[in-house]
């Protein structure tokens, strides 16, 4: 072990240990290498969460815009056809 590596004692459920061991075997890695690879991958994918949040926010804004446009079209249709039953949004 080099000076920049640390020993870590860790408790994990037996089912997780078995999954890690199976994955390590399939990937031709030691248990330690498998755990480190999975941790590193989770940190790297975690960096994309900000981008995903931005995309989700943009989709929510677009959905609100479409909803508002739809409500305006319903109101216009109700003005244009006053003798018919009013158009309405389901659930409202």
Image (cartoon, grey):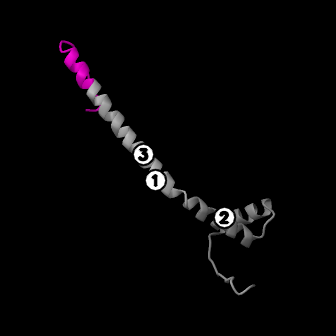
**For the C terminus, which image quadrant?**
top left
Query: In percent of the image, x 20 and y 19: which residue is there?
Result: 79
Packing grade of label 3 (10 A; few <14, some 14-19, many >=20) is few
Indicate which disc, 1 or 2, sits on the residue closer to the N terminus. Answer: 2
Packing grade of label 1 (10 A; few <14, some 14-19, many >=20) is few
Q: Nearer the viewer, residue 67 or 38?
A: 67
**For the N terminus, which image quadrant?**
bottom right
Residue indicated by mark 3: 58
**Where, by quadrant of the figure, is residue 88 drawn?**
top left
**64 sits to left or right of 13:** left
Marks 3 and 2 sit apart, C-alpha to C-alpha, by 30 Å
The magenta stretch spans which residues?
74-92
Packing grade of label 2 (10 A; few <14, some 14-19, many >=20) is few
In what element is the residue under mark 1?
Answer: helix
Mark 1 touching mark 3, by CB under 8 A? no
In what element is the residue under mark 2?
Answer: helix
Disc assigned to residue 53? 1
In what element is the residue under mark 3?
Answer: helix
Marks 1 and 3 sit apart, C-alpha to C-alpha, by 9 Å
Query: In percent of the image, x 69 and y 82: which residue is there?
Result: 5
Total numbered labels placed on residues in the image: 3
Residue indicated by mark 2: 38
**82 sits to left or right of 52:** left
């Amino acid at each position: 072990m080099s000076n920049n590596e640390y020993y870590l004692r860790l408790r994990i459920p037996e089912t997780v240990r078995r999954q890690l061991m199976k994955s390590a075997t399939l990937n031709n890695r030691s248990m330690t290498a498998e755990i480190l690879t999975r941790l590193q991958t989770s940190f790297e994918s975690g960096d994309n969460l900000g981008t995903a949040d931005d995309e989700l926010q943009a989709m929510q804004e677009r959905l609100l815009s479409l909803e508002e446009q739809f409500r305006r079209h319903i109101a216009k249709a109700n003005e244009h056809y006053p003798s018919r039953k009013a158009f309405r949004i389901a659930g409202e």
